Amino acid sequence: MPRFRTIVFFLLIGGLIWFLYEDDFKQDGLTGVWSEMKDDFNQLKNNNQISSTIKNLRFELENFFDSVTDDHSEDVPSPNIESPDLTKPSEQTFSIHNIVINDKKADVESILNDSKRSTLNEYGTNWYTYHEHYQNFVMVAYNDDNEVVGLYTNQDLISSSVDITLQNDKNDVRETFGEPLDSIKKGFVKYRINDNDEQDTYLIDDNYVTIFYDIHQENRIAAIQIIDKSLEDQKEDYFAAPDSALAEGLEYQLFDLTNAARAKFEEPILEWHETSRVTAQNHSEDMAENNYFGHTNLDNQSPFDRLEEDNITFRMAGENLAAGQPSSIFAHQGLMNSKGHRDNILNSDFRQMSVGVAFQEDGQPFYTETYLTQ
């Protein structure tokens, strides 16, 4: 297949050269064509914008050829993991994988076994991730007494005493619980929430329950986060204080959330790509420090340019950006509702991923996700 791509590429180049330099060939032969090509090349080389555009076009062509010619027969599919039997919670409205807020960690791990990862979150505690090949994916946060104070899943593990599950939609939720909260108060400041209508937050059982919707699936429930009110109340500001451990936590959480989404939609699991993580971190830092947001940086470099500059080879590459969301979960769910970002997250042809996070002085995070196939 690489030979086929090369043949097609040179045929296209040959056709383009003939189209551009046919008159020069007829007038002065190969010498005239060569002289004209050198002049044109020198002009293009000195124009950074045109040079960058040509690079981007080349990468897009390579991505296209990869999508139609790549052979994935060597890919090993994830095993099909059996889903648990879910029971309605008796003491709280919602449970995830039969776990509710205030359950003990020992009881949780008797159900879910040991966690796969533990990383710092915006509440100053850790998210513990539990899954089998990213199926039956659950994130759990504990307090100092090893009691559950946070839960999240984007998979069919939700049970409720009011018959709300992952199969329901926004209309069902609002018919059941009414109008969602429009703000959360912290100290003397009210922070507005639910501005984009892609999630609803309710105060239920003394827990902040956020239900995320999938706008690409007719506003069906996409995920749920449950945070104990005491945990939310102790978080003084909307954004957590900038911290290197928090940046690392958000990075790995986004990686796990992406793979949980890919498992949900039956796409291959991605591997962590440590080398490109630095490239992603540098771009997040650049955006945070220089107060801009975009795939093209202030030096007019595209994501592909930045990878090449860091000597990272690839056959396919993509980039997702987010900023302003206070957590990895809100950032991920927002990206899933954006068509282009969702396409990267669920692209069947990507094989590696890295994430880089940086903060502005007020704690606002900037997220860069890099997707690769090498």
Image: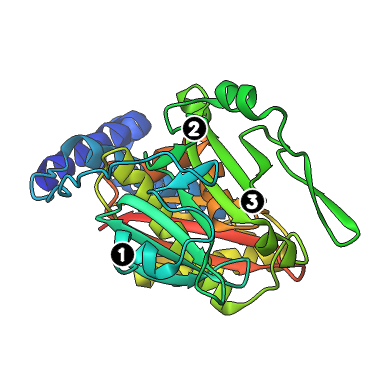
Judge depth for marks 1 and 2 and give the one in front: 1
**What distance separates the C-alpha of mark 1 from that of mark 2?**
28 Å
Q: Which residue is the site of mark 2?
A: 221
- Residue 158 image point, x, y percent: 43, 40
* Residue at the image point whose x is 34% and y is 68% from the top: 115
Q: Is residue 125 above or below residue 79?
A: below
What number of labels is visible? 3
* Residue at the image point whose x is 69% and y is 62% from the top: 230
- Residue 290 image point, x, y percent: 72, 65
Residue type, numbered disc 1: Ser
Which quadrant would residue 266 be assigned to in this image?
Answer: top left
| Secondary structure of the residue carrying numbered label 3 | strand
Note whether residue 199 is visible.
Answer: yes
Judge depth for marks 2 and 3 and give the one in front: 3
Q: Quadrant of the C terminus?
A: bottom left
Residue type, numbered disc 3: Asn
Note whether residue 32 is visible.
Answer: no
Colour scheme = rainbow
| Secondary structure of the residue carrying numbered label 1 | helix
Q: Residues within 10 Å of mark 2 (few under 14, many from 20)?
A: many
The furthest residue to the right: 188
Q: Which residue is the site of mark 3?
A: 207
- Residue 238 image point, x, y percent: 74, 59
Please state which of residues 163 and 172 is positioned toward the viewer in this rendering: 163
- Relative to 343, 280 lies left or right: right
* Residue at the image point whose x is 24% and y is 38% from the top: 67
Q: Which residue is the site of mark 1?
A: 110
Q: Tag on residue 314?
A: none
Please state which of residues 70 and 24 is positioned toward the viewer in this rendering: 70
Q: Quadrant of the N terminus?
A: top left
